[in-house]
Image (cartoon, rainbow, N blue to C red):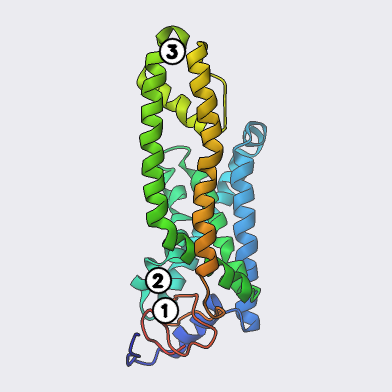
Amino acid sequence: MITPKFERPAPEWQRKLHEIIFEADTPAGKAFDFALLWCIMLSILAVMLESVTSVRAQYSAILHIIEWAFTLLFTLEYLLRLLSVQRPLRYAVSFFGIVDLLSIIPTYLSILVPGSQYLLVIRILRLLRIFRILKLGEYLHEADTLIRALRASRYKITVFLLTVVTLVIIIGAVMYVVEGEANGFTDIPTSIYWAVVTLTTVGYGDVAPRTVLGQAIASVVMLLGYGIIAVPTGIVTIELARASQPGVSTQVCPACAAEGHDADAVYCKYCGTHL
């Protein structure tokens, strides 16, 4: 348990700025959040339109201006977010802090690396704030439950994936020996690729066994794939059944901008600041 720490009272302008940018309880804060969501959606739409050859040929200059206008706007917003919290570094390394930074970097990077501006679609992650804005606390609770279940499953799933990797390497090597280069299995990596595609029941068909023994092995691998797919599902399902916690609040910490506090929390569980 984190012991509440003494915090120097924030200046009035900082508290007001934090209230507008991070909170959705006031008319000003809600208006800011909804305006931000519209800007995010419009900027993503502009990026997608720019990738269409016919649209880019006719409206390239306009889309370029729109892209830079939104980037400068989001850059200003990012700096204001850093100014509005008492611990800007903690916000900068948080999930949303990193997403906010990544959503503006591609435009500046496109000066050196042409085409990198299309990575701006990462801005869609910023729309996750809609759960806090619309006070969908139950959705936050369910999302937190899912995250905790995935964390609890990570060791079991890691062992499972290592087992699958070992299996496809063995199967790939066997198929390379059985089928050989004449039947399309030109090397072991290609055979491993076939094993992965077959084991996951995708079946592209670009490489296929032609010998009777190879087809028999392929049949076994296909049937094995159905059983393997069910394993991670079962692991996560068990952890989901175990995961439970009180409802999650939409309150944002004024010091570190952390979210996901318990509904009855009085202090931030990350830095101890009074909520």
Q: Closer to the observer: label 2 or label 3?
A: 3
Task: Name the amino acid type tagged 2.
Answer: Tyr
* Residue 156 drawn at (x, y percent): 40, 54
Residue 196 in the image: above or below residue 136 = above
- Label 3: how many Cα within 10 Å (few below 14, some 14–19, many 20+): many
Q: Are marks 1 and 2 in contact (CB under 8 Å)?
A: yes
- Name the disc covering residue 91, or none: 2
What's the distance in space between the residues labelled 1 and 2, CA to CA?
Answer: 8 Å
Residue placed under numbered mark 1 in the picture: 85
- Given residues 77 and 58, the one toward you in this image is 77
How many neighbours does mark 2 have within 10 angstroms: few (below 14), some (14-19), or many (20 or more)?
many
Under mark 3, the amino acid is Glu
Q: Residue at left 44%, top 76%? A: 257
Within 10 Å of disc 1 (Cα), the crowding (few <14, some 14-19, many 20+) is: many
Which of 192/10 is in front?
192
Give the secondary structure at mark 3. helix
Identity, as a three-letter code, of the amino acid under mark 1? Val
The location of residue 134, given as percent across then percent down, is 66, 73
Q: Earlier in the sequence, mark 1 or mark 3?
A: 1
Which is nearer the N-term, disc 2 or disc 3? 2
Q: Is residue 93 above or below residue 88?
A: above
Residue that carries the numbered disc 3 in the rendered image: 179
- Residue 110 against residue 23 in the figure, above or below: above
